[in-house]
Image (tube, grey):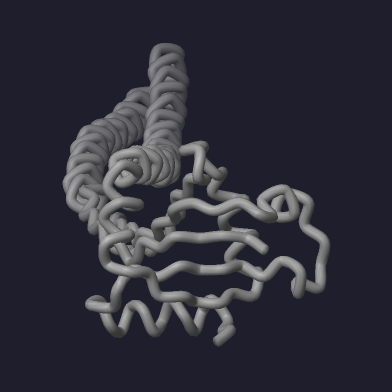
Amino acid sequence: MSAALGEWVLQQAMNRDLPLSELVFDYSSHTAKVSVIEELTGKSGILRLQKFTIESLERTEDYLLFAALDEQGNAIPAEVVQKLMQVPTQENAIHQDNQVTELLPSSTVLDGILEAERNQVEKSVNSRNLSFFEQEVSKLDVWADDLKEGLESSIKELDKQIKEVRRDAKIAVTLEEKLALQKQQKNLESQRNKSRRELFDKQDEVDERREALINSLEGKLNKKITVENLFTVQWSVQ
């Protein structure tokens, strides 16, 4: 009985106690020519499908990982197995005695292949998470730099005005002018002191935001990993 692979996988997932089966991939009835599959015609081996789930950054991602060996123990590349899965299939039951004979020698090799694939997925996720973290830190740094530059620019402008008032006060010819300029200088110095205090306060705010960002991302970046073997089958291509 032939069936689409998606339907077959669903049936397997709904009943974990089914005996080991053989999937016969009928490449002869496949409408498209796929050279890497054509090279497998007449060959057989063992295939395992694993569900790999990663929860990170408040997002859950599921990956279907394939590992396959031919009858000589040669590994079939995952991208080739994925193409193979698009070929029409026929399912055949296998006698229990043959299951143990066929599976045990290959199980460790399949596990090694799947572990390498999981490591590659984790590496990709870690790289993406690192990029996200760097982007968030960069946003914070840009905000902090803009804030600091704005306040420092304001303080420099006040310093410039204070020097000008002091110069004018020295050359003022009347007491009224000197008093008015001294009052103006005092107001400018008061504004400068206020801006300096604000700069220190904003620097503290930056430090607090940075600490909050690190604490928030630290929890979100922690990965929760789940590994589930969906099925292991013998395969052949005709």
Residue 133, image x, y percentages: 36, 42
Left or right: residue 33 versus residue 168 is right
Q: In this view of the protein, can residue 231 be seen by the observer? A: yes
Residue 70, placed above or below residue 62? above
Q: Is residue 113 above or below residue 10?
A: above
In the drawing, does residue 65 fall left or right of residue 105? Answer: right
Residue 129 pos. (x, y %):
38, 45
Judge from the rendering whether residue 97 lies leftward or rightward of residue 102; answer left or right. left
Query: Residue at 39% of width from left, 23% of height from top?
Result: 159
Q: Quadrant of residue 60?
A: bottom left
Q: Is residue 143 visible?
A: no
Residue at 49% x, 84% y: name it. 7
Instruction: Give the vertical position of 102 relative to 155 (above or below).
Output: below
Residue 1 screen position, x and y as percent: 55, 87
Along the line of sight, the residue nearer the viewer: 40 or 154: 40
Q: Nearer the viewer, residue 51 or 165?
A: 51
Q: Residue at x 31, y 42 (%)?
A: 105
Foreground pick, 138 / 125? 125
Q: Quadrant of residue 161?
A: top left
In the figure, residue 191 lies in which quadrant? top left
Total numbered labels placed on residues in the image: 0
